[in-house]
Image (spheres, grey):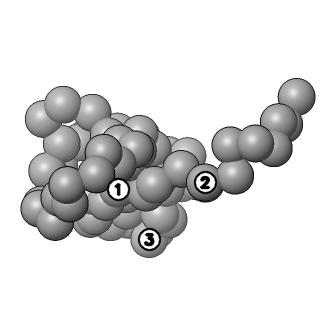
Amino acid sequence: MISLFGKKPEPAPTVYTEQTCSSCGAVERRPFEQGDHVYKEQGVRCGKCGSNATIVTAIYGEYPPESDSKKKS
Ligand SMILES: [Zn+2]
C-alpha cells in the first residue's frame, strides 16, 4: 500500500480492483471490496466468455478529479 501521507488533508482515493479472466484474458475493473487481494481467485463469472476463472490482478487507488466546481448534472 502507498503510505505517502502529507500534512494537509487529502481526498480519499477510490480504490479499484482489477480482475482478469484467466480463460479469455478480459480485464474488468470494479470497486474494491473487503478481502480483495492480488491473485485472489474470485470465482466471479467473466462477462465475456462466461468462465468463472477470474482472478484479481491489481488493486489501486484513484483520486477523484479535482474539478469539483464543475457540476455534471
Ligand atoms: Zn473470460
Residue 2 rendering spot, x and y as whole percentages: 16, 64
Is label 1's Cβ within 8 Å of ligand 1? no
Q: Nearer the viewer, residue 46 or 67?
A: 67
**Residue that label 2 marks:** 66
**Residue that label 3 marks:** 25
Q: CA distance from mark 2 to mark 3?
A: 33 Å
Q: Nearer the viewer, residue 7 or 44?
A: 7
Q: CA distance from mark 1 to mark 2?
A: 15 Å
Is label 3's Cβ within 8 Å of ligand 1? yes
**Residue that label 1 marks:** 61
Q: Earlier in the sequence, mark 1 or mark 3?
A: 3
Label 2 Cα crowd, 10 Å radius (few <14 / some 14-19 / many 20+): few
Q: Nearer the viewer, residue 29 or 2?
A: 2
Element on which disc 2 rests: loop
Q: Quadrant of the C terminus?
A: top right
Element on which disc 1 rests: strand
In front of the other: label 1 or label 3?
1
Q: Amino acid at mark 3?
A: Gly
In front of the other: label 1 or label 2?
2
Q: Amino acid at mark 2?
A: Glu
Is there CB contact under 8 Å for labels 1 and 2? Answer: no
Q: Earlier in the sequence, mark 1 or mark 2?
A: 1
